[in-house]
Image (cartoon, coloured by chain):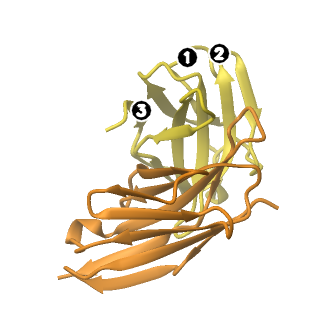
Amino acid sequence: EADIYQTPRYLVIGTGKKITLECSQTMGHDKMYWYQQDPGMELHLIHYSYGVNSTEKGDLSSESTVSRIRTEHFPLTLESARPSHTSQYLCASSESDGQGNTEAFFGQGTRLTVV
Amino acid sequence: KNQVEQSPQSLIILEGKNCTLQCNYTVSPFSNLRWYKQDTGRGPVSLTIMTFSENTKSNGRYTATLDADTKQSSLHITASQLSDSASYICVVSDRGSTLGRLYFGRGTQLTVWP
């Protein structure tokens, strides 16, 4: 098991609420990622970070925001949740082996339902 | 456009049988290819990694092959078990960016019946 944790595992929340999905890793990885995954579909990168105070948007446009104040912590925030935000959110961190080979370690995911 | 295509989309087999999952990719420049297993409601877990120079790699009952010329990979599962029921995702990494971009297939949903 990789040392990367997401909370909560499941969240049902009303439209318009502000939510923060937590992600922490204890492996000391500089690179961290947030992916969005709908059932039966591929993972889409929505945010990534190369290190502290570094955040970038991914391929899939998202109304969420992220922050990276500490190496181990990469929370994702939705200021005003909408039903279209209903999805599974996966956090990952990665390391390279010095030969350009990247392995990503994933958290268990947060299943978000906005009603 | 960098893409990863997997087939079949879903597969049902009986316990004890073998199966093979396919992955075709167009990612360039290629760095490596990984197969991940994703149980329902959980995050993906890496099974194998294949670099450009490797043709085959085994991890227990899982054997992955890579043909870098045709840009195809396969994952062979031997003597399937009920616990093999999961989504198997092919992930290709490029060498052309500092991010070490990961390109994901949609996965093959494998169901093993007793």
Q: What is the quadrant of residue A99 in the picture?
A: top right
Q: Secondary structure at mark 2?
A: loop
Mark on residue A4? 3
Q: Earlier in the sequence, mark 1 or mark 2?
A: 2
Residue A71 x %, y % = 55, 17
Looking at the rendering, in which quadrant would you find the C terminus of chain A?
A: bottom right
Q: Are marks 2 and 3 on the same chain?
A: yes
Identify the chain drawn in yellow.
A
- Dot 1: chain letter: A
- Dot 3: chain letter: A
Q: B39 above or below A25?
A: below
Mark on residue A82? none
Residue B78 x %, y % = 28, 72
Q: Are marks 1 and 3 on the same chain?
A: yes
Whether residue A115 is visible: no
Q: Earlier in the sequence, mark 2 or mark 3?
A: 3
Residue B110 x %, y % = 38, 75
The residue at which mark 2 appears reads as A52
Which amino acid, mark 2? Val
Q: B10 above or below B73?
A: below
Looking at the rendering, in which quadrant would you find the N terminus of chain A?
A: top left
The residue at which mark 1 appears reads as A71
Q: What is the quadrant of residue A38 in the picture?
A: bottom right
Which amino acid, mark 1? Thr
Q: Nearer the viewer, residue A94 or A23?
A: A94
Q: Nearer the viewer, residue A20 or B40?
A: B40
- Dot 2: chain letter: A
Answer left or right for B78 relative to A5: left
